Image (spheres, rainbow, N blue to C red):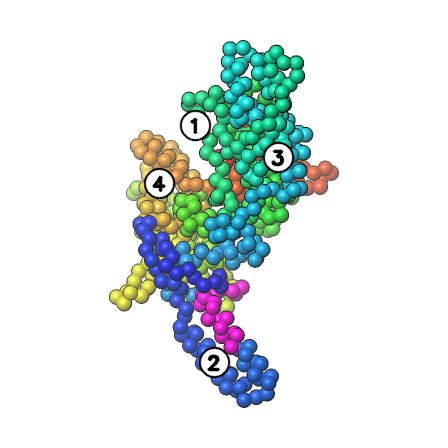
Amino acid sequence: DCRRPQKNALVFTAKGESHETRSLNNNNNNNTNRHAMMEKRSRRIHSTSPVGVLGYIVLLCVIVNVQLISSFVIQHHHNFVSSASSSLQERVTYIKSSQTNEDVESSSSSDEGVTWKEELEEKELDFVLGYLNKHHTALLTSFVSTFSPLGEIQASKNAFSGGSYKITSAVLKDVVGVEKMVLEANVSVRGKSEEVVEVVEISLDANPIKALQRQSSKPSPPIPTSFLRSSPNTSSLDILVRKLNRLCHLLTLYKTTNSSPSVKEINSTTGKFIQLASQFSQKRKVGIIKENLFLNQVPHNRYVRQYFYDMASEAVLEAVVECSKGSIGNRMLMTCMFPEMNPSMDSYRIGTLLELARSVAIKLAEQNLRVRVCVQGSMGVGIFTGTPKQLNGVSTLLQRMDWQSNAGEENEGMVGDYVNFGAIGKDHVVNTQYDDKGEVVQHQDDVFLLLCPQNMVGIESSIIPNLSEMVEAAGDRPVILLNPDLTDKVSSQGQQSVRGRQDRITFANSFDTVFHFANIYVSGTSYFPILGALTKLNVREPWVAHQRRDFKDGGGEIYVPIVSDEDRIEGEVILDCFQS
């Protein structure tokens, strides 16, 4: 990150408090040596020919550019040396902008003073109108009956005499930005020989009409448009699809007429809308998985593993950036359960877990963030202690694996400074420490990555107390759980199933998913063949269930989006859509 750090930025503290801090130190000693070297060179050049004068001018330009660059520069060959003062907010301020080119920067969020493009492109609008009017006329009619004033009239007039007022069909005429739809509805009124044509507008953030709302149902919150717009990878079509899918799921709760599409058809339509958006996306394709992963073949190919490492690392980095802005909470959940990461399967490979943790930690450390990778220690009381089988030896292997951190290697000086190791508990949370002169002698941990925290069968203790104390000690710094299992296990005295159970469930549910990939199988005891996958590939992306399909004549495989929702999709809904 070569940009000048932000001044007076907020610092994440142990108790979540914030205070002003100085900008990054400019490494005055290095700059002094650099000036002396430039002066010597300039004296040798100044008395020479015009070529020497030109060279002198070039050197002056170099000096000016050096002064404009922050002293901490992460180059291709990383040299991880501590800066004198560095807060998490300062270090993530320009992370995303430094990774994108100028064209992408010009389309950043409106919060930075850049106008976000509201309208769909002409070809996108034409395709949306044509596709919906040709294949989803019944869905459009249900939209009018459920979300428009015509639906209120229909419910009122049919309350005492059914069939007095009927919305027979609807045609989508226009989509105004990502705010509303304009439809032309045909209405059949008893006593009139011809149908009446009505033009109606429906907000894409609408809730069902009052006549259909049940007292026990809660209004569905609108799609967080402003949050989605803050990413340069989100297009207007992506937001439109998310809002259409929200309306579709509301339809499954309020069936208006017998001619309305079935719940299974509506749910399947949400997956088709995800496919629609991906056809026009020139940026990151929302909810789309790479073809020909062949996850049924184990061990996986190296490029398959690297695909998941890169995808998970990018998702975690973006979540940390949003946490520093206050857009999301600091309790994060990352689930990566392809066959080599699933401990319930014989294909489980501990090396894949370690490589994923290393990839995530290095990704964050490259952005000048200090990461502590934690593995839970032995649990239990007295002689009845032990470590989960999945984590047996992981702590030792994690420190012995190759981090390319030795002298002359790519990540020189990273381990021990920007990446450290520990266990789960408040004692392993390191805060900034100062000496008598006010100088930093120990930097705080910025991000905590916890590998597979879990309870154990038969052990009269839970990981939840140690984990909750650590989260409390971390304050507002990101705490990321990788493949956790926080459910209560069977124990001889019932300590994990009776006392404090609701508190443990509430704590486990307080972590928000920032990345999720889990394969779908026929049953819990049969792991092959793979039917599909349930994904949430980024903090901004929706939940999407994919069905795995084979190409003709052994030409490969593809994961096709089948159903999408803003919340985690239930297994029954996924299987119904698979069968349809």
- Mark 3 and mark 1 lie on one chain; the one further toward the N terminus is 3
Nearer to me, 157 or 178: 157
How far across and down, in percent of the image, does residue 140 sit?
60, 27
Q: Which residue is mark 2?
A: 37
Q: The C terminus appears in which quarter of the rendering?
A: top right
Query: Label 1 near label 3: C-beta < 8 Å?
Result: no
Q: CA distance from mark 2 to mark 1?
A: 70 Å
Q: Which residues are magenta?
A: 60-78
Circle 3 Cα neighbour tier, 10 Å, few/some/many (<14 / 14–19 / ≥20):
some
- In which image quadrant can residue 170 be found? top right
Q: Is residue 453 magenta?
A: no
Q: Which residue is mark 3?
A: 174
Label 1, secondary structure: give it. loop
Residue at image location 42% in from the left, 50% down from the top = 325
Query: Label 1 near label 2: C-beta < 8 Å?
Result: no
- Mark 3 and mark 2 lie on one chain; the one further toward the N terminus is 2
Q: Amino acid at mark 4?
A: Ile
Q: Which mark is residue 218?
A: 1
Identify whether 72 is placed above or below 148: below
Label 3, secondary structure: give it. strand
Residue 284 appears in the picture as rendered: yes
Identify whether 40 is placed above or below 103: below
Residue 346 appears in the picture as rendered: no
- Mark 4 and mark 3 lie on one chain; the one further toward the N terminus is 3
Q: Amino acid at mark 1?
A: Lys
